[in-house]
Amino acid sequence: SAVISQKPSRDICQRGTSLTIQCQVDSQVTMMFWYRQQPGQSLTLIATANQGSEATYESGFVIDKFPISRPNLTFSTLTVSNMSPEDSSIYLCSVLGEQETQYFGPGTRLLVL
Amino acid sequence: QQPVQSPQAVILREGEDAVINCSSSKALYSVHWYRQKHGEAPVFLMILLKGGEQKGHEKISASFNEKKQQSSLYLTASQLSYSGTYFCGTEGAGNTPLVFGKGTRLSVIA
């Protein structure tokens, strides 16, 4: 199974600012995803991070608000821009491993004041 | 479309059994089951591919009925460690991101 790390693990931010979350995988993976999980809720896919091209965003999520980078097969970043309290959530990086299993990172807990 | 899970929550005493269901309105390529404990990331339990096979360990298993677009997770002789929220994630085609249900909160008490 893939070992995934995320930085930061948690942060408290002021509204109007931006935060960049990093996701590092211990092996090369083709597919990486970013999810959001609001307290007590399910996991909602934000986007698929594509290596060498723009990310593919799900309905309700836009690049200006959640820009994503994927410079290589082991790393990706998600930026939450111009934050508001509604962006308070857990942000999870996920990768597709062997036998089509999807693994999750530990998550980044974000609180926007 | 988001799969529908039932029940939303269940409380068990140690040793009791439970079934969690997951259904979709569209054709499925696979169903994945995860357990998430409070404050932690979801942990992969098992994947079921088209074919209706049942998989799992002795006490946690799952089935996938492709024609009915349904999957069920079976927990037998539950232990305290089984407590958490169980999510099913469905995949409509290979190598696409999962769409998750709203989760079933399972509490096992002594």
Image (cartoon, coloured by chain):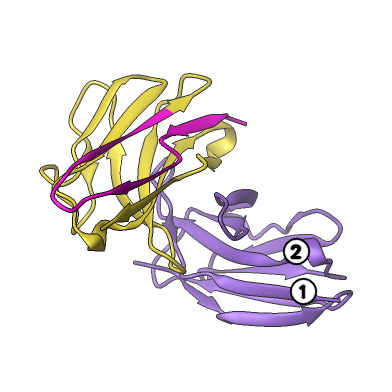
Q: Which amino acid, mark 2? A: Tyr
Instruction: Judge by depth and name the residue closer to the eye, A38 or B93.
Output: A38
Q: Which mark is residue B82?
A: 2
Q: Position of residue B15 (x, y in %)?
A: 89, 74
The image quadrant that residue B65 belongs to is bottom right
Residue at (24% x, 63% y) in the render: A86
Q: Which mark is residue B108?
A: 1
Instruction: Tell me the element at label 2.
Output: helix
Q: Chain of mark 2?
A: B
Instruction: Tell me the element at label 1.
Output: strand
Residue at (62% x, 48% y) in the render: B44
The image quadrant that residue B60 belongs to is bottom right
Chain painted yellow? A
Residue at (60% x, 65% y) in the render: B86
Position of B32 compared to B46: left or right?
left
N-terminal-most mark, 1 or 2:
2
Q: Position of residue A63 (x, y in %)?
A: 14, 42
- Residues shaded magenta: A1-23
Q: Colour of chain B?
A: purple
The reply to whether the magenta stretch includes residue A20 is: yes
Instruction: Judge by depth and name the residue closer to the eye, B65 or B100.
Output: B100
Residue ranking furthest to the left: A64
Q: Which amino acid, mark 1? A: Val
| Whether residue B65 is visible | no
Position of B18 compared to A55: left or right?
right
Q: Position of residue A80 (x, y in %)?
A: 22, 44
Quadrant (top left, top right, bottom left, bottom right) of the N terminus of chain A = top right
| Whether residue A43 is visible | yes
On screen, residue A13 above or below B100: above
Q: Are marks 1 and 2 in contact (CB under 8 Å)?
A: yes
